[in-house]
């Protein structure tokens, strides 16, 4: 018997349940009671975390559902629209074999996200990085230097967040991406519920990163649209519009994903110009 055959046995049939597809019910702790989904899904399967992949929490249920083939953006939009009723957030998945269908994920309890304060996380990353620099030289983080500015103030909405997310999904779907579904109350929580490990080299846990994205949902109208092996794609309905605001947001982005700046423009000022007024944010971790 190989490792994959030692996965927990699924319960026979959660009752009562509002979602007609039995496999999807197992994504929910309560079997999807009171949930409904009318959109027709393509062939797919629920994905259990690979028992051979390091797990930091007990595995009690599948982490997510993934389609067998790429899907059109229209399906993503329909599922996004149904999320309040279904409890399933759609994500366009790049590189479907690894980590997705291979189960190279390590889910964490979504309840842990609320234990993290984005401002404290940002300050900790900032201080840790500065402490490791020769002579404490933080000039690469100019104009802030050693002084972490904390989270930026909210942006001014220039688009409806959901409409913009649908448009961004059309852009991403041109790559031929698979569809993932996670049982979460909001898109930011997919990082933790699905056990995404894309930022592992930056931070061991996904819960604090999800807490940061929750803040961006609230302050910038961000929506999680795409995930890859080590990438994250967000639509942003209220981006920073001034140079000063963009610089402050750039500092947040650096703490969240240092590679965005260090392997991009190289300075916060240069990166700020890239994101000023931009309605999508893409992150990549080395």
Image (cartoon, rainbow, N blue to C red):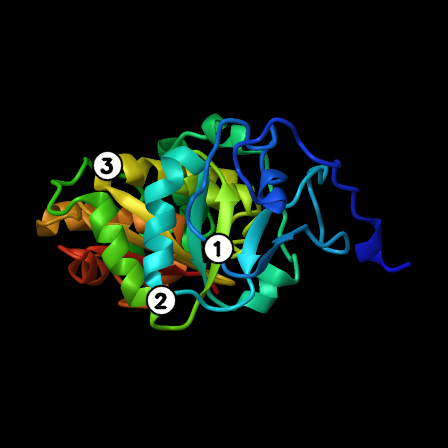
Name the residue at 72% across, 54% down.
Answer: 50
Query: Are the residues tagged 1 and 2 within 8 Å (C-beta)?
Result: no
x, y percent for residue 238: 17, 44
Relative side of 276 to 126, left or right: left
The residue that mark 3 highlights is 219
* Mark found first going from the N terminus, 2 or 3: 2
Label 2: how many residues lie within 10 Å, few (<14), some (14-19) or many (20+)? many
Q: In this view, does 16 lie above or below 255?
A: above
Relative side of 251 to 7, left or right: left
Spatial CA span between label 2 and label 3? 26 Å
In the picture as drawn, the residue positioned furthest to the right comes out as: 1
x, y percent for residue 148: 30, 39
* Mark found first going from the N terminus, 1 or 3: 1
Relative side of 71 to 166, left or right: right
Label 3: how many residues lie within 10 Å, few (<14), some (14-19) or many (20+)? many
- Is residue 127 visible from the viewing direction of this image? no
Mark carried by residue 173? 2
The mark lying in front, picked from 1 and 3, is 1
The mark lying in front, picked from 2 and 3, is 2
Pick the residue in front: 85 or 54.
Answer: 85
The mark lying in front, picked from 1 and 2, is 1
Mark carried by residue 41? 1
């Amino acid at each position: 018997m190989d490792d994959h055959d030692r996965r927990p046995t699924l319960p026979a049939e959660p009752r009562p349940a509002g979602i007609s597809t039995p496999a999807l019910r197992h994504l929910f702790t309560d079997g999807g009671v009171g949930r409904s989904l009318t959109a027709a899904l393509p062939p797919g399967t629920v994905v259990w975390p690979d028992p051979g992949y390091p797990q930091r929490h007990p595995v009690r249920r599948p982490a997510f559902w993934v389609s067998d083939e790429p899907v059109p953006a229209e399906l993503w939009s329909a599922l996004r629209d149904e999320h309040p009723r279904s409890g399933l957030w759609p994500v366009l998945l790049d590189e479907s074999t690894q980590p997705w269908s291979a189960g190279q994920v390590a889910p964490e309890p979504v309840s842990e996200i609320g234990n993290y304060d984005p401002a404290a996380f940002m300050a900790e990353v900032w201080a840790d990085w500065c402490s490791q620099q020769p002579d404490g030289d933080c000039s690469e983080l100019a104009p802030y230097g050693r002084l972490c500015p904390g989270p930026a103030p909210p942006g001014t909405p220039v688009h409806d967040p959901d409409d913009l997310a649908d448009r961004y999904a059309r852009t991403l779907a041109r790559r031929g991406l698979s569809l993932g579904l996670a049982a979460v109350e909001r898109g930011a929580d997919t990082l933790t519920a699905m056990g995404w490990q894309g930022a592992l080299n930056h931070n061991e846990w996904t819960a604090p990163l999800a807490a940061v994205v929750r803040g961006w949902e609230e302050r910038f109208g961000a929506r999680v649209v795409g995930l890859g092996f080590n990438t994250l794609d967000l639509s942003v309905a209220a981006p920073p519009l001034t140079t000063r605001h963009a610089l402050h947001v750039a500092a947040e982005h650096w703490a969240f994903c240092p590679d965005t700046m260090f392997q991009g423009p190289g300075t916060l000022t240069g990166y700020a110009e890239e994101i000023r007024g931009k309605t999508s944010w893409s992150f990549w971790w080395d």
